[in-house]
Amino acid sequence: MFCFDGLLEEIEQADIITIFRHVHPDCDAVGSQFGLKNWLLENYPDKKVYALGKEYCTQGNCWPASDVPGREELKESLALVVDTADEERIDDDSFELARRLIKIDHHPNRSPYGQRMYVFETSASTCEILAEFFRQSGKEMSQKTAEYLYRGMLTDTLCFRTTNTQSHTLEIAGWTAQFSVRIPELNRELFDQSLRDFRFANMIRSTVKILDQKLAYRIITVKEQKEWGMTASEARNFVDEYGHVREFEIFLLITEREHNGSFVYDASLRSKTVVINGIAEKFRGGGHRNASGVKGLTRTECDELISALFASIPR
């Protein structure tokens, strides 16, 4: 199932390695990025390894700051892009300077890029893929690296509840956990809420819009984001508050932002069994079968997106 022919050789031949993630990074993006960086530094201490990205993951408090390598180092580097379906979603366009480019991902490979691609669409997360690569390599892995990977596996599967959670997902998570992963502590770090977040969750639950008891959504305005002292990215992370309602087949959170004097909207989409990434792609977005995102919608397109998602639910 997993074939990494040539990847270890590419890594071992490179003196400088740059690692990129996608915009609006989640725990799988930063977990795979910093897990890979840490593993490389542990096993190849003489290499220069940089993790790049302008945006910050708001879930968890463990993520290091991004690196800022020099232009000449970028030009000499091997660029590894993790958890990113297409080039347009890479956070930091300096990847274009790299001498070679490799894609490591689990999204549908509709936008191939790079000299090599290691794309495994049946995997539940990119952290799952990298954990398998590390296992096959036979090289050292520390608790720190293992915990970066475990965070990504845990969150991208919604605690192993998504439909793409397979036997290998649980097996490799178990293998990763043997490196003294602090499972209870990581769960608290990722999923415990502050009092502010608890109250915000109550607000979006009590004001949710529901269509035929099957689709739930909420648009969070700029004014509300300011009132709650919350970024748009932080607000969209609450989409899973709707995921525990038995009747909801599809649920989404949409955040408003100002752009060139008007408002545009970004959406986080989730489903339990309905395939939604095809619909997201029609609105210039994309993602997983049951978890996708869309950016830069007009208000009219928000309504069209909601209607398309509602129409996709089996009756």
Image (tube, rainbow, N blue to C red):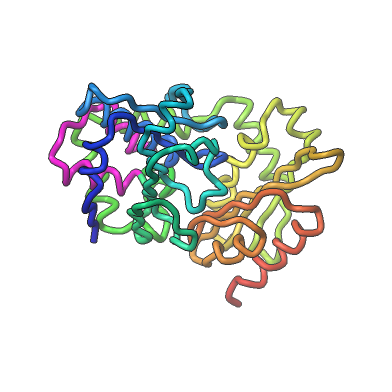
Instruction: Name the side, left or right, on which 227 lies relative to 105.
Output: right
Q: In which image quadrant can residue 194 be found? A: top right
Report if residue 134 lies within the magenta region.
yes
Give the quarter of the figure containing the C terminus: bottom right
Residue 274 lies, in percent from the top left, at 53, 67
Q: Which residues are magenta?
A: 127-151
Q: Residue at x 61, y 65 (%)?
A: 279
Q: In which image quadrant can residue 309 be found? A: bottom right
State whether the magenta stretch is mostly helix, strand or loop: helix
Give the quarter of the figure containing the N terminus: bottom left
Report if residue 147 lies within the magenta region.
yes
Q: Residue at x 23, y 52 (%)?
A: 4
Instruction: Name the side, left or right, on which 104 lies relative to 205.
Output: left
Location of residue 102 with respect to 148 vertically, above or below:
below
Residue 16 lies, in percent from the top left, at 33, 29
Q: Residue at x 32, y 24 (%)?
A: 48
Location of residue 200 with respect to 293 vertically, above or below:
above
- Considering depth in this image, is 154 or 93 the residue closer to the camera? 93
Instruction: Name the side, left or right, on which 292 lies relative to 147.
Output: right
Instruction: Name the side, left or right, on which 268 lies relative to 177.
Output: right
Q: Residue at x 56, y 57 (%)?
A: 286
